[in-house]
Image: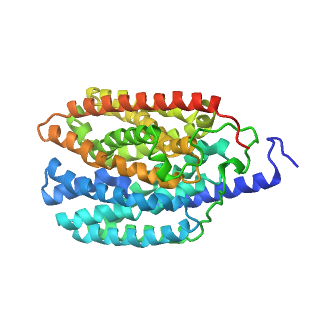
Amino acid sequence: MMDKKGMSMDERERLKKAYRMSLIAGICCVSVNLTMLTSLIRSELMEQNGWSYMKMTIPFSVGTVTGVIFSLFTGQIGDSKNCGKLAMGGAVLYALGVVILAKFGWSMVALILAIAVLWKLGPSPAQGGLTVAASKWYPRRLATKGTAYSTLGMSLSVLILTPLYHLFTARMGYSNGLLTLGLILSVIYFIAASRFEAPDIQNESNDSGEDSDTVRSAFDNYNVKQSLFTPQFWVLALASFILNCGHSVILGELNEIVKHCSGAEIEGWIFLCLGAIGGTSGRILLSHIGDKVGTFTAWATAFATYGLFIILFPHIGNAYIMLGLYLLLDASVNVCIVSSIAGPGYVFGRKHMGGISGTMSIVSAASGIVGPTIFAYFADRGNFTTPLLIIGCMELVGSALIWYINSWYRKKTAKQPAIV
């Protein structure tokens, strides 16, 4: 029996479970996203330790690269039937990172370890595992929508965590407040992960909710090793590298950019909350249009918009207009982030999507060094426009790469016979 949307009872039940798994993944992402408060924590550490911009890039760059290398393994969590249990282990690692950051953040060695654990090793099973697994519960024709819903917690986390961060640190001090909040979040992360159920995708051609005449990519159901020998893998990996170069700078240095380019002092948490609103809006927008206009079309357009916004941002001169532009900027970057997760699934199929995406993140690991280093080199010399011009142009190149993938994908799916 079919409903008005042409869905059977089994398909409706699967979709209900998909929404439930997206909610659990969202709760886990909110819990682990202290990383979204990077600009606040960086400012606190720089003030306490008297470090320059360049020196502050060291722990975040080394920690990011270490964590991304670990993604070679954690990316496959989304393909594992035990992804919920693995995420529970990530919650324990996350708690360890919180303790190191809160109590030993004054030491460069300890800070590098804390960033690696707290920014990557702990969150990866949730951000790179549960979100991928939750998106697989959706039928393939709703793949982008499912990815957007499953990653919504990444944006909403800032709206939730920013006031909590201020509340705990104002009442208990930076160290004790961060420690208490982080441990509470670790417990929530652990409990939520224990309730997650992995999807069972045996073959994309038999995915629930698919029509028998669905056309597919030439590389459908490719595994990690097979995908490595395709140019499309490396183009997508390069695009992710370019995206992360810009995102790592905007996420970590927004306060300083606004202060030096507008002359106005605005609390960093205001930008974080506005970014969360823009990011959430971008993901919701993509959930409605991504599967209709095409994931790659939406991705390339957002990439170009993001690049132009970064170039324009330091030239505004008015902090409040910059606030408005930042809403649009963060909406664009979140469309790119969601698309970069869903995109490989269209090219290579979703059966091994977690492993393929995790391997791509290895390729883009250098972005955690390149973006912040470019910015720090110029910022220490009082120049905040040139690094954003360079990064903005890089984002425009990223747009061109995705348009290439879009053109290739449309040609291949048009020629490829249906797989039943």
Image quarter hosting the C terminus = top right
Total labels drawn: 0
Q: How is this picture coloured? A: rainbow
Q: Position of residue 198 (x, y in %)?
A: 61, 63
Q: Residue at x 58, y 42 (%)?
A: 144
Q: Position of residue 86 (x, y in %)?
A: 49, 69
Q: Residue at x 45, y 72 (%)?
A: 89
Residue 280 in view here: no
Relative to 60, is 89 above or below? Answer: below
In the picture, measured across the screen, residue 125 lies left or right of residue 256, that is right
Relative to 29, is 334 above or below? Answer: above
Q: Nearer the viewer, residue 214 or 297?
A: 214
Q: Residue at x 31, y 41 (%)?
A: 245
Q: Nearer the viewer, residue 47 or 109?
A: 109
Q: Residue at x 35, y 54 (%)?
A: 37
Relative to 312, is 144 above or below? Answer: below
In the picture, measured across the screen, residue 96 lies left or right of residue 296, that is left
Task: Name the quadrant containing residue 399.
Answer: top left
Task: Name the quadrant containing residue 265.
Answer: top left
Residue 371 in view here: yes
Q: Nearer the viewer, residue 261 or 288?
A: 288
In the picture, measured across the screen, residue 122 lies left or right of residue 394, that is right
